[in-house]
Image (cartoon, helix red, strand yellow):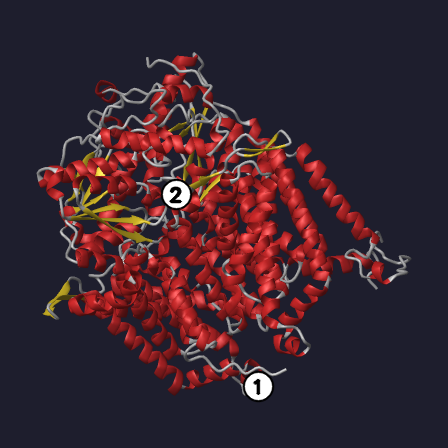
Amino acid sequence: MGILYNIFIDPFVQMGQAPDLFVQTLWEGLVGGMLYALIALGFVLIFKASGVFNFAQGIMVVFAALTLVGLHTAGVPAFLALGLTIAVMFALAWTIERVVLRPLVNQPDIILFMATFGITYFLIGFGEFVFGGDPKVMITEALYLPKGSITYKAFGGIVSLQRLDIVAVIVASIMVAVLAVFFSKTRIGRALRAVADSHSAALSVGISLEQIWVIVWFAAGLVALVTGIFWGARSDVSFALEVIALKALPVLILGGFTSIPGAIVGGLIIGIGEKLGEFYWGPLVGSGTDAWFAYVIALVFLLFRPQGLFGEKIIERV
Amino acid sequence: MFYREAGQFKTSYASDQAVFPILQDRIGVFIILAIAFVVIPLTGNDFIINAVMIPFLVFSLAAIGLNLLTGYTGQLSLGTGAFMGVGAYACYKLTTIYPGVNIIIWVIASGFFAAAVGAVFGLPSLRIKGFYLAIATLAAQFFLEWCFIRIPWLYNYNVSAAIEVPQRELFGIIVTGPRASAETRYYIVLSIVVVMTWMASNLMHGRIGRMWMAVRDMDIAAELMGIRLLPTKLLAFAISSFYCGVSGALMVFLWYGGAESAVFNINQSFTILFMIIIGGLGSLLGSFLGAALIYILPIILRFVPPQLGIPLHAATIEHITFMTIGALIVFFLIAEPAGLARLWQIGKQKLRVWPFPY
Amino acid sequence: MKARQLFVGIACAGLVATAVFASKAEAQGIYVPLLTYRTGPYANSGIPIANGMHDYLTMLNERDGGIGGVKLNVEECETGYDTKKGVECWESLKGKNPAVVNPYSTGITLQIIPKAAVDKIPILSMAYGLSASAVGEKFPWIFNPPTTYWDGMSMIMRYIGGKEGGLDKLKGKTVGFIFLESGYGREPLPLLQQFAKDYGFTVKEYSVAGKEMQDQSAQWLAVRRDRPEWMIMWGWGAMNPTAIKRAAENGFTMDRFIGIWWSGSDDDGRGGGAAAKGYLALNINGLGSNYPAIQDIKKYVVDKGKSQVEKDKFAENFYNRGVYNSVLVAEAIRNAQKLSGKKVVVGEDVRRGLETLHITDARWKELGFPNFAAPITGVNCTDHNGHGPAYMTQWDGAKWVKVSDWIHPIKEKVRPLLQEAADEYATKTTGWPKRTEACDKAS
């Protein structure tokens, strides 16, 4: 009985007793979820257009952030460094398309997945070679990112919101909105959806696959840069940041590989779910549950919807 | 010229369906085994045996395990590292509880524990497929990894949360623990790997293997043909995990000599997955080739610059190694996306008509 | 395709062969391998230590022509904090008669402990690794001076006791413990729980998985809920700066947040930003470059471009930690030369040298490190650790400042647990070799 009480009743009693902490947990979950969603978005963009499961998204985040900080330390003014980093990400997208993707057109998904692993290895080595392995502090002030926090007295306690987190959520939302509009309203966006549906059909109506791929990899690079700036500011910029890409996997699977809103909703569910889980139920098993909780949430969802929340229905015919 | 099967007639179905139907292949396999069993222990030094051959064989076995599941049955798994861990911890518990029993028996027995755990985490595979299935196995990976450190009983309440391999003897020869000689350990690993590869090969050429491949190629069609999906997939998970478990036990008992939970982390799973992709999905030979490329190549690369007399810092060498491996992976994929095993087949085909290609 | 494959194969085989043969050829001077990691997720902690270790030994070569007239052959082996590569390093270096091995990773230490006695190479795991290995009868080849994690925990408790006005004042209060989910992080838990039992306070555990170390928001929310009086941290790598940031965000009072000596690098403080001001960490080595020997390193190594250290990171805390490690190595080699009468000493001699390691205040001064570290007097054949003291440092927003005197461990709490752990270790691993090595008297 005691166990059942601890699992099913006590956490909710706690939520009621300290609503400020509950709200705070929700907020932390929201911020975390938004950032997970950003990484997942990078995956989705590339998967949609080329069917590549891009294992290198994590290292792209690190690489983008390192380039930005590295350029700034070399004496380049912050916003010029930002512009140069964007240029670097474009060059990266172009190179990947030329060197890796083009010769691998029409190969099975798993081979392309493997190729992105090759890219990951290369970027790890290259990044450490150029920038060194020691951690860098993200430039926040030069980019006019606010610091400090706003504290509200509410819900019978204190809720404090980090200014940086607020900006992160706003920027992430804008980014998602812009991408959504870009993909549904513009010519390139329509071309991209055509490519996602069928490579050969798109080719036959005169859409350039190469161009589309460079664009999506570049877009994924931009998303990586934004992710890198905010994750970097939340902790620091080092190669340890690469593992956060793993966090995007349950998000992706929950939201479906091809859906932008899915990435957002999935990110929020995972972010909030794992924070609530760790905060209220974690102590029952000795905490540290956030290492696997996200995957269990995703697994439970999957058992009911095998294609993810927003994924396209899988219709199989013999 | 040397590789012609002309004149080798098959007079029975059995000989036609043999694993190595061509005489030259049989000779080749015999030579490889001879090298592995005789030449390497005689000529190799400790470094070759301890840091190259034993790990290579251990990884090959794990790669075969994953290949049975991913390559032959088409179920993507990212939990290999954790299943290896189950084997290692099971073996450790078994041998500390019953120290008198032959350690080889426990190494094999630990595979059954891994198989049971693997089958449990394989349950969702009936409903979930492809990359989506990977999540189920990822959940297994992270959950088990958490268990390895969270359940102190598993490592006998060691304060540093580590398992240390006790010394065990077999017919008066020390086989595990610090004082076991490299050759002894090498022979045990090699024997187990050879026997298990042979078993896997037979499995693949038999009914079970065919069932698995049918499920991989199209599971609905397989179901219509009367293959029951759930038992087949679960069997694949169980046998695959069995192989991984044994390889995990070998890894800790005959290679590392001690371990903490971090050894069985997600990177381990990815490494094994990459071995089978680059080696060739659905190929036993590919498992070995992939393990060789992913594991041995970095070791060699690390030795190249110092040997050429280029004075580089250890870290710089590591950076260059990383870049080279990345580039090589992409290169091999572009050269032959179906893996090294396919490359080998093409090579054989070329050899068959050499020196007159037409 | 075939031809190319064949060519690659032959080339590889040839390279391995030459590598193996060539490695046997070189045997000049005393070979001191350093297992370092300048790459991978823990590089932020690994780089300054690697630089410190490397630069002090290089300085000895440049200034004194080595030790006892014999050059040191210093060679780094990159592990990336990866156990596999660590074992590879061990296998590749053991044939070259290394004097001593510094693994710098608890994971790697665990793998090579059993190998040490067989290959006759001593391991110096300075204030990390397997705590039980301090018992010299059971682990003649493993050394972990100057102190253990359990001693560290007891020193933190002593410090807290000092601030609270006695540890019994903690009765009914809560102490939080945030740690990296690994053997290293879990190690001090039994001792902390023992203290909790003895003094009637509650321990709250917050574990951080390696994969989650850059987030930690759930853990720190839980800290906010549980309102502990004190927080103690056992972190490593990128976990440290993140924890410091989260602590500040959640309004935890920084001068009640104490880290172990591995949670106190300058990068940790800097990463935490201005908010990190007040954060405390234990330390075992002196701060800054104001020591004659460190000045020598600058003069002979750094200014001559023989170091990889960035100028502004010279003589930071973890750099000095690496220097400290190398001083122990150098002293052990000196002792070994004295004891064995040989010039070029190998592992077996250095093991004896480490067992007679004895660095008094006067000797520290002689070495050019006045008041750099506590005297090492407790290391002998039975005790390979010495259980020396440490002191508390505080981050003032830009650098670490010493804020306490030497704090000694609470021996009566630590020793029984340690003995128990070592006994258990040796009984569980049956067939653990009996100590056969003779004991030397300290000179």
Q: Is residue B117 above or below residue C175?
A: below
The residue that appears at 65% across and 49% down in the rendered structure is C8
Q: Position of residue C180 (x, y in %)?
A: 32, 49
Position of residue B78 measured from the top left corner of the image (x, y, whole percent)? 50, 61
Place of residue B2 in the rendered image (x, y in percent of width and height, measured from the top left)? 84, 51
Q: How many marks?
A: 2
Q: Chain of mark 1?
A: A
Do we see residue B266 in this rendering? yes
Q: Which residue is mark 2?
A: B161
For this orientation, the residue located farthest to the front is: A1
Q: Pointer 2 indicates a residue of which chain?
A: B
Asked whether the residues under marks 2 and 1 belong to the same chain, the reply is no
Question: Which residue is disc 1 drawn over?
Answer: A204
Which picture quadrant has residue C124?
top left
Residue B247, image x and y in percent? 57, 48
Q: Secondary structure at mark 2?
A: loop
In depth, the one of C156 and C88 nearer the eye is C156
- Taking the spot 54% from the left edge, 72% from the top edge, the residue there is B126
Q: Residue at x 52, y 32 (%)?
A: B178
Q: Nearer the viewer, residue C291 or B159?
A: B159
In what quadrant of the picture does the N terminus of chain C appear? bottom right
Q: Is residue A112 shown left or right of residue B146?
A: right
Residue A206 drawn above or below residue B178? below
Q: Which mark is residue A109?
A: none
